[in-house]
Image: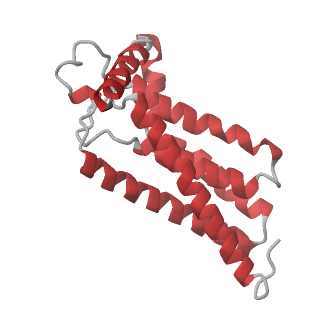
Amino acid sequence: MWEQLAQWDRDAFVFLNNLGVEDYDAFWIFITIPRHWIPLYIIILVLFFLAFQWRKALTGVLFLLLDLFATVGLTNLVKVYVARLRPSNQPLLKDLIRVLQEPHNFSFFSGHAASSFTVTTFVVLVLRRRFKWIYALYIWPVLFALSRIFVGVHYPGDVLVGAGVGVLMAILFYWLFKQVLGRYESIYTFN
């Protein structure tokens, strides 16, 4: 059963990766680099302070960072434990795919997908009542995660599991955030 799933994952990867065209390679390479998204990270921070008083905003940002660091840590532990080679490092796939990046660590699961989905989901959960348009923020992790397939470094299964882990971690940290707010409501005035 696992081998059949792995084969479907490889076949889906080869198909999706080959949908990429050279004219868009620069776009996908740009999208996949985290530092290119710094303006978005700054906007997210500003939104917390526009939505809430400074104490609740700082608490929200703190939990967002804790969520992100925990997700990145979990991702790295799983990558080392599972030790799945990236498609770009598979000799049998090398001639069938387009490779635009050459990372040498492991593939399962996608840290780009996990971290972007955890940040986005946490932000959406916290700010959805203040900014109805906040769901549009999901464009970022979808593009970010897809870029990993188009640059040749992640299977679709890596991306889907990474996205799922990111969402679950965000839900956990949102619940913890709400617990902390509930305990300290009598001490601080949160709006």
| Residue in the picture at 38% in, 59% down | 73
Residue 105 as seen in the image, left or right of residue 147: left
| Residue in the picture at 32% in, 24% down | 4
Residue 34 as seen in the image, left or right of residue 176: left
| Residue in the picture at 42% in, 19% down | 25
Q: Nearer the viewer, residue 175 or 30?
A: 175
Residue 111 as seen in the image, left or right of residue 176: left
Give the quadrant of residue 92: top left
Q: Quadrant of the N terminus?
A: top left
The outermost residue toward the left is 91
Above or below: residue 47 compared with residue 160: below
Q: Nearer the viewer, residue 67 or 40?
A: 67
Q: Quadrant of the C terminus?
A: bottom right
Q: Is residue 137 visible?
A: yes
Give the quadrant of residue 23: top left
Residue 17 on image: x %, y %: 39, 18
Residue 124 on image: x %, y %: 70, 50
The outermost residue toward the bottom is 187
Residue 139 as seen in the image, left or right of residue 150: right
Above or below: residue 171 compared with residue 8: below
Residue 153 on image: x %, y %: 33, 31
